[in-house]
Image (cartoon, rainbow, N blue to C red):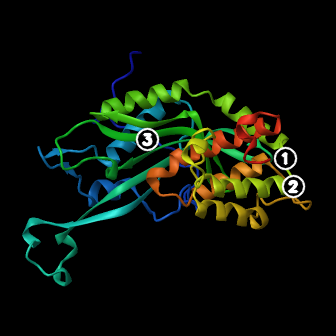
Amino acid sequence: MTNLPAYQLNEPSAQIIPLVQTQPQRHFIEANTRPVTIEHLAEDCVVPVFSKDNELTIAHQSFIEAVLGAVHRVFPHEAIDTPEIVASHVIKGRIPEAIHKPASQLLESDKTIYYERMAFCVEIPTIYEDVAGNRLNLSIGGVRAYNHENLYARKGAERFKIFIGFKNLVCCNMCVSTDGLMDDLRVMSVQQIYDAAVQLFCRYEMTKHFNAMARLSDYTLTEHQFAQLIGKTRLYQFLPSNERRALPAMEFTDSHINAIARAYYADENFACNDDRSIDLWKVYNLFTGANKSSYIDTFLSRARNATTFTHGLTRALDGDEKYRWFVE
C-alpha cells in the first residue's frame, strides 16, 4: 500500500475557504432531510455505541473531518468551500436523570438526539468544467447510515461511502462516475477513512469523466424513443428475473420515473426541445434531478446508476444490443 500521511485528529485542519457567505438555496439531496452544521453534530448530538461492548462508533463529524483532511492533502492549492451537510431519521433519547419524566415535562437538556443517516458535499470551485453551458464544480463528499450497522453487536468494521465527481451548479445535481465512488468502505478507524479517501481522489480519472459527460450532448432521443425509455423502465421491475438479469441494472423506482416524465415537459433547464427531441445530457440531468428525492442511504448508488445507464444509452444509439431494449 502507498505510504500516506497520517491523519492527526488534534492538528488544526487547513483553512476552508467559503465561496459565498450564504447557504445554497437548493441542496444536492432533498428527500426527508434537513441541513445541519458540523458544530450541531459535534455539540448537540450524542454518538451511538455498539451495545455489546459499549465501544463508540465513528461520529459523523469525525467522518467529515477525515474526508476534508484528505481533500486538503490531495488538493492543497485549491479553494475549498464549506461542506454542505444534510441529515435524516433523527433518533431521540433522554438522559438517565429523565428516565421517569413524562414526555410532556421533558426539558431540552433532558433530551438526546443523533441522526441515523448523514450526507455531506464540499465543492472545489477552482476546479470546474462546462457542459452545454452548465458549470460543473468538482465536488467531494460522503454518506454514513447507521441503519447499515448492527449496533446491537460488538464493535466491528463500520461502513461508509465516499465520492468524488461534479456538481451541476444549474440544478445542484450530482454527477458521480464508477471510479469516483467508494460504495462500501469498511473501516475500524478514522485514519483508515482518511487513507481510503486519499487513494480514491488520486485514482479518480477526472478528465475521462468530464469527456464522457460532454459526449452526451451529441446524442439525441426522439419523442418516441423517450416514451419507449419511460415505458421500458417501468416494465423493468416486473420482468421475469432471468430476463431482468440479462439487462443492465436500473435502480430508479416508479416515483423517480414519474418525476423524469414530468420534467421532460416542465423542467426549466432540461425539458425537451420544441420538436420534443431531447439530448442525452438533458436526459442524464432528468435522472440525477429525480435522484435528489432518494433517501440518503440509496442516493449515491443511484447517482452512479444514472451515469452508467445514460452512457449505456449512447451505446444503444450506436447499435449496441445491450441497452437497445430500453429505447427500441
Residue at image location 38% in from the left, 31% down from the top? 194
Q: Residue 240, how many percent across, how many down? A: 57, 49
What residue is shown with label 2?
277
- How crowded pointer 1 is (Cα within 10 Å; few <14, some 14-19, many 20+) is rated as some
Secondary structure of the residue carrying tag 1 is: strand
Vertical relation: 108 (above or below) 9: below
Mark 1 and mark 3: span between their CA atoms?
33 Å
Which mark is drawn over residue 220? 1
Labelled disc at residue 269: none
Q: Amino acid at mark 2?
A: Ser
- 313 vs 148, left or right, is right
How many numbered discs, if any? Answer: 3
Is residue 83 in view?
no
Question: Considering only vertical position in the picture, is 73 above or below 150?
Answer: above
In this image, 57 relative to 316: left or right? Answer: left
Dot placed on the residue nearer the N-terminal end, 1 or 2: 1
